[in-house]
Every structure is written in structure tokens, then in C-alpha cells.
Amino acid sequence: MQVKLAAKIAKDYVTDLLADENIANLGLEEVVYNEEEQAWNITLGFSRPWNSSRNAITTITGEPAIRRAYRVVKVRDADGQVLSFTKRENLD
């Protein structure tokens, strides 16, 4: 499986799984192929409405500071099946 297809499968999975959470700014962050497991580890970042925070700067500008959540979706190379969806600590 090509990396683009693995990333698309992961994005589609997260979009569907978290549809009721109104995620925004879904983006590809990292791709690692695990030879031993024959699987792609696709790290995706996204924002949720409740992850926004306010501070002095955001009060002035009116725009909340949006934090991102990161998740790793493991996609099996042979058939594109999603094997896991796990939390990844912030990449920043």
C-alpha cells in the first residue's frame, strides 16, 4: 500500500470516528512504517472546540488559542484495516 492511501484511510477513519465531536484542522503530522508489524503508523493532528483557551492576547484579538490533539492510527499494510487509534503526546 502506498503511503498516500494509508494516510487517507487514517484521515477517513478519524473523521468518521469523531464526527460528533466537531473536530477541525485535521492534518497529517507524521508517517512511520513498522516493518515488523507490516503496518503504517499515521500521526494526525486536529482541534476540538473544547480545546480552545483564552488568554490576554486572545481576549484582545477575539480569537481563541486552539490546542491540537495528536493521535496515531495504525493501518495494516496488507488490507488497509485500522488496527488501533492511540493518543500521541504533543509534537510541539
Image (cartoon, rainbow, N blue to C red):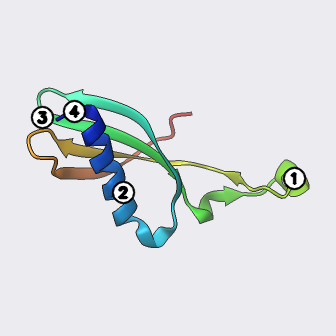
Q: Could you say whether the residue bearing mark 2 is in a helix, strand or loop?
A: helix
User: Mark 2 belongs to which amino acid?
Assistant: Val
Nearer mark to the viewer, of 4 and 2: 4
Q: Could you say whether the residue bearing mark 1 is in a helix, strand or loop?
A: helix
Quarter of the picture containing the N terminus is: top left
The residue tagged 3 is 37
Q: CA distance from mark 4 to mark 2?
A: 19 Å
Q: Quadrant of residue 77?
A: top left
The residue tagged 1 is 61
- Residue 87 percent location from the top left of the image: 39, 49
Q: CA distance from mark 1 to mark 3?
A: 47 Å
Q: What's the residue at 21%, 44% (across, down)?
A: 75
Nearer mark to the viewer, of 4 and 1: 4
User: Mark 4 belongs to which amino acid?
Assistant: Gln
Instruction: For the residues labelled 1 and 3, say whether their Cβ atoms are less than 8 Å apart.
Output: no
Nearer mark to the viewer, of 1 and 3: 1
